[in-house]
Amino acid sequence: CLGYWDPSSDGYQYDPFSKQKLAGLESSTVSAESVLTKIPQLPPTDEGLQIALSMPLWGNKMDLSLWPADASQNHDVFAEILEKAHENLLHDDSGAVAKHCASLREKGGGTVDIIVDNAGFELVTDLAAAQYLVDAGIAKTVTFQLKSHPTFVSDALTKDLLETVDYYCGLDPDKFPAAHAAGLKWKSFLESGQWKCEENAFWVQGLPMWKMHAPLFDDLKARCDLAIVKGDANYRRLLGDLEWDTSAPFDKVVGAYFPCPVCALRTLKAEIGCGMAPEETERAAKADKNWMVNGRFGVVHFST
């Protein structure tokens, strides 16, 4: 209705959420500086990978729908989340992910796709993890699978990723040295082809992922050594938005059909899930009656 695809329309390529995305990006620079200070210091080990993956996992909690309205550039909101990250993890396959990534490193690096969810600070944590994957020798190339057009408030498009990189390149290196340096590195990755951006209309559709369009499915199957699926909305599509038994194994629900090895990083924001032991879901329910919907708890799932 906006004429998004019509070059003659005033709405051509217009993103109605641009102001919110920019506000989220600008208000999160202190948290980003903290994250981006740590990333270059992480060793190319299993522990280093697990820490790197924790960034985009819990970064999903801070999408634009949940980012505090009073967040400022002087307060590290994300550090407070990471302090409680371990106790709020209801399933953790990061050891299996690390083993798979070690095999990619041993062969000289693989092809990793990140199926992106949200712009703003969450996208920054995705970029931070992608930086680690390249620097640690796990990935020769990282392809960001992005939305083809804005649908929800924080949907990440190619232009959002490029604007984020440019924004970080332009930060004051005296005030935000790690973030500025990261921006320059990300730009070099894009220019060298180590990072690639792909947009696909499938990522903004309501179809379950087992109905992935054939060209996309075939591409992932032939090319991708590891797909990292980000966020609650993408996770729900992995499950077809169906009410599975929450203890049903992830590798039986998702691994049975997904075209390549897949790691799902999710903070729970909807009342469906799988791959969580009954004692863990019981623990979460006792701690918080809204445990399935408020983003407090998370999972790391993996299947080959």
Image (tube, helix red, strand yellow):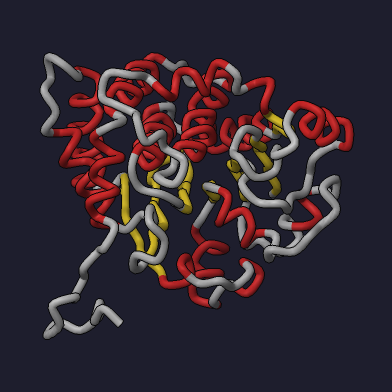
Please name the residue shown 19% across and 17% down the image: 177
Counting from the top left corner in percent of width and height, residue 129 is at 43, 33
Against 129, is 14 above or below?
Answer: below
The number of numbered badges drawn on the structure is 0
- In the picture, measured across the screen, residue 205 lies left or right of residue 146, that is right
Counting from the top left corner in percent of width and height, residue 39 is at 39, 21
Please name the residue shown 64% across and 57% down the image: 236
Please name the residue shown 65% across and 59% down the image: 238
Counting from the top left corner in percent of width and height, residue 19 is at 22, 51
- In the picture, measured across the screen, residue 273 lies left or right of residue 192, that is right
Q: Which of the two residues, 227 or 151, is positioned nearer the viewer here?
A: 151
Counting from the top left corner in percent of width and height, residue 111 is at 46, 48
Q: Which of the two residues, 216 or 124, is positioned nearer the viewer here?
A: 124
Q: Which of the two residues, 185 or 242, is positioned nearer the viewer here?
A: 242
Against 28, is 304 above or below?
Answer: below
Quarter the N terminus occupies: bottom left
